[in-house]
């Protein structure tokens, strides 16, 4: 059975992290995945959660029955600047301490490097992982990695190879559906990628995106032409070109029983309606 979680990113501007658990319960979710925010763990910054924050979050979970299923921190632990890398490893240590206090035993994250220096970033990532492995193992926390647009690894094939190379049982893979076209260089062969990642696939991010490489690469127009940037969305299912029938069929075929995280971004005015519709779709697809 899958665990369906809400990424409450569209609610962070109007409520506290603890209050987002109440919002999740209101919408019908039983789990949340806490993505970066200023109150807890902002991108690349030292986590700001303190004892009061932990107490409030645990009380919200008790009051609502909603569990903090996963965290999704993003730290520059592949930085080629060694001082920066060490600072980001320190950020990870504190994040893992907080995760343990909250009762989270599974985390998803990014490689967080630079596509212009892939070899150097890969070496730094393995170095950081080696330093942090005893901490993950001490807490009994597993980690699922995703390839990301404008990271030093952007395709599934490369990301999965790097994960396998670490040879750690607790290190898994997360398939990010809105990155489907980046992961596949525009092919969009979601089912094939899901089946290929099955041995280590433990989470799937659920939202839609258009194929940025379609129509001679002119699905989006970026100025100036050739600028060093990446474009993608996190839309509601149906507002994009991700082949959802293929995604869900492949997940059922491999008997996927991990986390499905609903991570729609940028549609705050319709956040409730969109999140509820996607939740209902997932319940129907997975008989829950």
Image (spheres, rainbow, N blue to C red):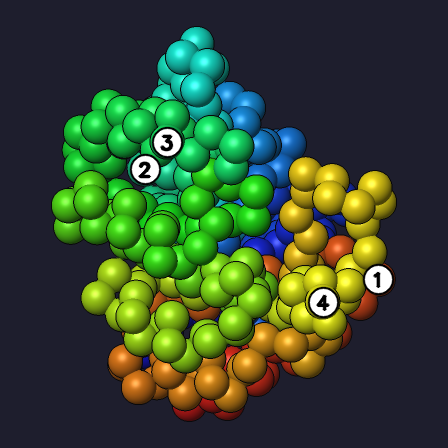
Report, in whole angstroms, how far the alpha carbon at label 1 lies from the one at label 3: 42 Å
Report, in whole angstroms, how far the alpha carbon at label 1 lies from the one at label 2: 34 Å
Which mark is in front, 4 or 2?
4
Query: x%, y% of residue 85?
Result: 41, 18
For the N terminus, which image quadrant?
bottom left
State the residue position of label 1. 269
Picture disc at residue 18: none
Query: x%, y% of residue 82?
Result: 40, 12
State the residue position of label 3. 119
Picture disc at residue 100: 2
Report, in whole angstroms, how far the alpha carbon at label 1 lies from the one at label 4: 33 Å
Q: Residues within 10 Å of mark 3 (few under 14, many from 20)?
A: some
Which mark is in front, 3 or 4?
4
At horizontal 57% and vertical 42% (from top left) the residue drawn is 150
State the residue position of label 4. 216
Q: Residues within 10 Å of mark 2 (few under 14, many from 20)?
A: some
Indicate the quadrant where residue 23 lies: bottom right
Q: Earlier in the sequence, mark 1 or mark 3?
A: 3
Q: Residues within 10 Å of mark 1 (few under 14, many from 20)?
A: few
Q: Is residue 128 above or below residue 212?
A: above
């Amino acid at each position: 059975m899958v665990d369906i979680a809400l990424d409450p990113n569209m609610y962070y501007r109007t409520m506290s992290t603890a209050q987002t658990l109440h919002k999740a319960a209101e919408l019908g979710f039983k789990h949340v995945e806490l993505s970066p925010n200023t109150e807890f763990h902002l991108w690349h910054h030292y986590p700001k959660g303190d004892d009061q924050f932990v107490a409030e979050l645990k009380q919200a979970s008790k009051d609502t029955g909603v569990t903090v299923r996963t965290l999704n921190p993003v730290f520059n632990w592949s930085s080629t600047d060694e001082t920066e890398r060490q600072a980001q490893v320190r950020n990870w240590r504190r994040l893992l301490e907080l995760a343990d206090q909250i009762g989270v035993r599974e985390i998803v994250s990014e490689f967080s490097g630079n596509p212009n220096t892939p070899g150097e970033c890969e070496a730094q990532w393995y170095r950081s992982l080696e330093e942090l492995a005893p901490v993950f193992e001490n807490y009994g926390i597993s980690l699922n990695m995703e390839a990301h647009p404008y990271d030093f690894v952007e395709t599934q094939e490369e990301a999965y190879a790097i994960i396998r190379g670490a040879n750690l049982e607790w290190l898994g893979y997360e398939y990010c559906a809105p990155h489907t076209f980046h992961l596949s260089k525009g092919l969009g062969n979601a089912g094939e990628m899901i089946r290929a990642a099955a041995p280590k696939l433990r989470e799937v991010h659920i939202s839609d995106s258009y194929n940025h490489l379609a129509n001679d690469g002119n699905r989006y127009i970026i100025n100036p032409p050739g600028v060093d940037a990446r474009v993608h969305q996190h839309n509601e299912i149906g507002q994009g070109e991700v082949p959802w029938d293929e995604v869900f069929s492949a997940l059922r075929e491999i008997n996927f029983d991990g986390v499905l995280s609903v991570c729609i971004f940028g549609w705050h005015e319709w956040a409730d309606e969109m999140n509820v519709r996607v939740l209902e779709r997932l319940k129907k697809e997975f008989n829950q």
